[in-house]
Amino acid sequence: MIYLDSSVLIAQLLAEDRRPRQDLWSESLTSSRLLEYEVWTRIHARGLGGRLGEVLRLLLARLSILGLERPVLARALEPFPSRVRTLDAIHLASADFLRGEGQEVKVATYDERMAEAARAMGFELYSLE
C-alpha cells in the first residue's frame, strides 16, 4: 500500500515541474482524510476549484481514505524521531496506524521534511521518479 502525502496530489493536479509517474495511480493508494482538506484548500486558494474540481474528485475516488480516528490523533501527539509540522504529524501517524494494523506501507511525498521523518520512522519511500 502506498500512503500519499498531499504534495503528490497537488503536484499531479497543478502539473508542477515534478509529477508522479503515471503508474502510481494504478497502485493501492491510501491517505488521511486530512489530504482531502489540504488539497481542496490549496485548489480554492488559487481559484481553480471550477477548473480542477472534477479531476480532483476523480483522483480522490482512487484513494482509500483513513478517517481522523482517535488512535491516529493520539499517535500524532507523541514524539517523532525528527522535527515534524502539525499536518505532517497527522499524516505520519496515519501511516503508522496502518502499519500497526499489519499493512506494508510505503510513503509517497515530495516534501523533504516529511520524507526524512518517514525514513526515521522506518518507512520505505515510494519512488516518484
Image: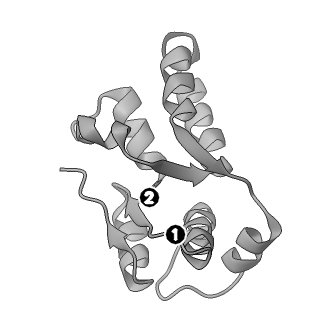
Q: CA distance from mark 2 to mark 1?
A: 7 Å
Pick whichever, 41 or 54, lies toward us. Answer: 54
Instruction: Tell me which amino acid carries mark 1.
Output: Gln
Instruction: Tell me which amino acid carries mark 2.
Output: Met
Give the residue drawn at x 36%, y 37%. Answer: 25
Residue 66: image quadrant is: bottom right
Q: Which residue is mark 2?
A: 1
Residue 52 x/y as whole percent? 49, 17
Pick whichever, 86 or 94, lies toward us. Answer: 94
Give the residue drawn at x 33%, y 54%. Answer: 110
Looking at the image, residue 89 lies above or below residue 13 = below
Q: How many marks can you see?
A: 2
The extreme left residue here reads 129
Give the residue drawn at x 39%, y 76%. Answer: 123
Q: Which residue is mark 1?
A: 103
The local secondary structure at tag 1 comes to loop
In the drawing, does residue 12 fall left or right of residue 31? left
Residue 86: image quadrant is: bottom right
The local secondary structure at tag 2 comes to loop
Give the residue drawn at x 35%, y 38%. Answer: 26
Is residue 113 at all visible to an observer of this figure? yes
Residue 73: image quadrant is: bottom right
Is residue 19 at all visible to an observer of this figure? no
On the rendered image, what quadrant is the N terminus found in? Answer: bottom left
In the drawing, does residue 88 fall left or right of residue 22? right
Crowd band around label 1 with a 10 angstrom C-alpha radius: few (<14), some (14–19), many (20+): few
Crowd band around label 2 with a 10 angstrom C-alpha radius: few (<14), some (14–19), many (20+): some
Q: Are marks 2 and 1 in contact (CB under 8 Å)?
A: yes
Residue 72 x/y as whole percent? 71, 70
Looking at the image, residue 47 lies above or below residue 17 = above
In the drawing, does residue 84 fall left or right of residue 32? left
Residue 58 x/y as whole percent? 52, 23
